[in-house]
Structure formats: C-alpha cells, structure tokens
Image (cartoon, rainbow, N blue to C red):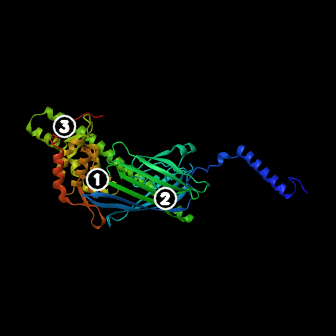
Amino acid sequence: MAGPGCGWHGSIRQGIALCVVGIGLWQRLPMAGAADAAPPLPRYRFEVGQELTYKGENETRYKDNGALKSFGDHDEWTVWVVRKNENGTCRLVIHSSEALWVGTKKLQDPQVHLSYCDVSADGQTTSNPSLGLHFDPGSLFPPLPPDRQSLAGGWQHLRPSDKAVSRYRLISQPVAPSGVWTFGETYESRPGDIFASNKKSTVTFDAARGLMTKVEYQESATDGSSTSTETRELVSAERRDAAWITQLRNETDRYFQVLAAYEQKQKEEAEAAIRQSRLMYEGQTLLTKARAAVHLPIVTEQLDRRLTLLDGLPAVAGDPNATVKIPTKELVAAINNHDLEWMTGIAGLMPQRIGGATLLVMRSCGPEVSDPLIAALDDPERFIAAHVILGRKNLKETKLDFNMYDQLVATFPQNKITFDAAQRTALKKLWIGRLKPKAAPASREPKGKLP
C-alpha cells in the first residue's frame, strides 16, 4: 500500500503545494513590465481621407416675466483629414453649420462657415484667421494629457475663440489599451465677463478609434436666471477617395490663402485711413496757425470754412494725450447699419462682424464723438451703428438677450435678423439720459501732438 504522498492523490497534493509556493514567490517578485501595465496615453489617430461627422444640440432655458422660455441651435460639423504635415500634425478642413431656433420656430437659415486647423496627436492646435469666432477646434478635438503627470494632476487649454481657460481632469480610464476614456472639463470665466455662470462638461474619448465620440455640456447662471445644456456627438466616420481629398486640399489651400490676403488688405485699409487722418491733422494745424495770423474777413471766412469741415477729435478713446486727429463729421456721416452683421445664440444677440466706417469710428474716435452719434440716431440708415458705437465707448457692460442688444430689439421675419427703425426715438432718449451732461462741442484748436 502506498504511503502518504504516493500514488496520484499524492501527486495532486504535491502539485497543489508547488503551485501555492510558486504563486507566493510570484507575488513577492517584481513584475516584469509593471510600469507598462497602465494603458498608453490617449491620442488622436487621424488618417488622410477620413470624413468625420459630428452633430450637436444646444438648448438654453430662462424665465421671462415668470414664463419659461427657451432657445438653442442645431449644429453639424463635417471634418476632412486632408494631409499630414511635416511637423507631425494633421490638417483638418471643417465645414460647420448652425441653425438657431426660438421656442418652436426656426430662427434663421443655417449659418455655414469653412475653416481649417492643424491638430497634433495630443490635441494641440494653433489659431489661424479662418477660425475667427466661428469654431474652436477644442470643441470637437479637446486637448489630451501631454504626459502622465498631467493625466494625474490635470491639464488646461486656452480657447482661441474667447481667450477663456478650460481645465481638464481624468474621470476614468480603460483597463484595455483600446478602451474608453472619460474626462471632466470646467470653464474658467475671464475677469470682467458680463455673465457669471458655472460651466462644465464630460468628454468621452474612444482610444480604439482615436477620436472624441461625445461631449455633454452644462451651464447655469450663478443667479439662477438660466440653464443651458449641449451635446456634441460623433455620428459617422467614413472615407473619401484619394482624388477627392487631393482636390479638396488643393482648393481649400488656395481659398484660405486668398482669405488671409483679403483680411490683410482690410487691415491695410484701416491703417491707411489712420495715416490719412494724420495728414488731415497736419493740414488742420497749418490752417489753424494761418487763422491766428490773419484778420481780414475776406481771408478769415475761407479759413473758418475749411476748419469747420476738418473739425476733429482725439483718436484714442479716453486718452487726454491722444495724438491723431480724425475728421469726425465725415466718419460719422459714413457709418451705416450694414457695417454690422448680427448673430444670436447662447450669449444673446450681438454683432458678429463690424466693418466700414463704423469700425473706424470705434477705433479712431474718443468718447467725445457722442454728440454726432446721438444725432445719427435719427437716421434710419445709421441708428443701429450709432447705438452700438455709443455702447462700446460709454458702457462697461452690455445687457443681451436672444432678441435684444442693449434695448435694441430684433425681429426675425423670414428667418433674418432685422430691426424696426421706429426704435430710433426711444434709443435717442435713452442715450441723452445716459450721457447727461452732454459732451462739450469739440474745439477747433488742434488737440494733442503728432507722435
């Protein structure tokens, strides 16, 4: 008869004992590659030819005289990966569409915009003129942690659209390398922001696809007056053929180059206007000195007439030492309501673009320009521009609503933003009250010195 430990029973017991000892030793030994047990850092995996479609829904709810109202927008972004750059980033071309609504009605036809950005694997981007205020790449491709230290302690992103800071933190990470990551995002308001609110979002990132697949955003005004929710989600990832992508890359490259050149021309035009103003100042100085030296009415009346036409104001708002003279009457006479393009959204009704003489008055004239602007409020073709300029120069903050900009009320017939000229009288009364006592008329004597 076999003794203890013999036979198949003994072999099993010996095997179990050896296994237990082996497990104990394995647990005490350092694991080979233990540092590699954590999944690799999340990274974007863009491929030339990709066509990504994201859709978003936004809704803001607020109370108006006790009644609950809402507005929002339907958004769609189509993103094409058109090339890999030498520095390792990928060139993305983005077509965005935003359709606004109020209550149950569509507010206007979708606003579309074409832009581009170069995105690195960890989501870093640089600003470029095509983005403007229309698109922040971080809304679809939020920055990822650059290293493991950031993954543990958090990282941040300066949004080019409004210069506010987004701060990110890890919520959860996958066990497998191809799993799903979740990040939390909070928005840091800038000093001086008109509307104080709490903003946060949750970002879902699919490591297997190398893409952000969903963002859920929440915002609430600190005074409880409104709440907003938004969802952005990847709905499709397709592939375009190489020939089409090549054509898109070549044609959009040309478009963005032309766009940059055009905007440079606009900048040069504004600078030329300032240079012209300096020349006008020099001319006014010559006339003023001559006026002081002559006395015969036949001569003085000619000089007085020319000085009246050239009557100007300091160039820099609020600067007592402003050096550039602006032909104020001519500039204010040239402003036009069509110098402004309007949009409305979560923040409220506001000018989307400002150009022409309206922009020049904003940049080149001081608050003393208020008198001619108040007079311009009587003009149906200029009252909107005058109201906006007065606000920019005299108010620290502007009250906005989805259909109102500082008591200028918009209507939306046929999905277009329009303003009833009958508001002119009320707006003029508003500004006369705000600016009492009225600004003193500008002196004919040149103010300041040339730089």
Q: Earlier in the sequence, mark 2 or mark 3?
A: 2
Left or right side of 348 for 377: left
Residue hosting label 3? 287
The secondary structure type at the circle numbered 3 is helix
Q: Could you tell me which residue is drawn at 57 percent across and 64 percent down?
A: 242
The secondary structure type at the circle numbered 2 is strand
Mark 1 touches mark 3? (CB < 8 Å) = no
Left or right side of 154 for 102: left
Foreground disc of the pair 2, 3: 2
Type of residue at label 3? Leu
Q: Quadrant of residue 147?
A: top right
Q: Could you tell me which residue is drawn at 77 percent across and 51 percent down?
A: 19
The secondary structure type at the circle numbered 1 is strand
- Crowding at dot 1, Cα within 10 Å, few <14 / some 14-19 / many 20+, comes out as some
Residue hosting label 2? 214
Q: Could you tell me which residue is drawn at 38 percent across and 53 percent down?
A: 219
Q: Quadrant of the C terminus?
A: top left
Q: Position of residue 31 (x, y in %)?
A: 70, 46
Q: Please, is residue 285 above or below residue 62 in the view?
A: above
Q: Position of residue 318 (x, y in %)?
A: 25, 38
- Distance from disc 2 to disc 1, alpha carbons, whole Å, reads 30 Å
Residue hosting label 1? 400
In this view of the protein, which residue sits in the foreground, 287 or 328? Answer: 328
Foreground disc of the pair 2, 1: 2
- Crowding at dot 2, Cα within 10 Å, few <14 / some 14-19 / many 20+, comes out as many
Label for residue 14?
none
Q: Quadrant of residue 367?
A: top left
In this view of the protein, which residue sits in the foreground, 28 or 118? Answer: 28
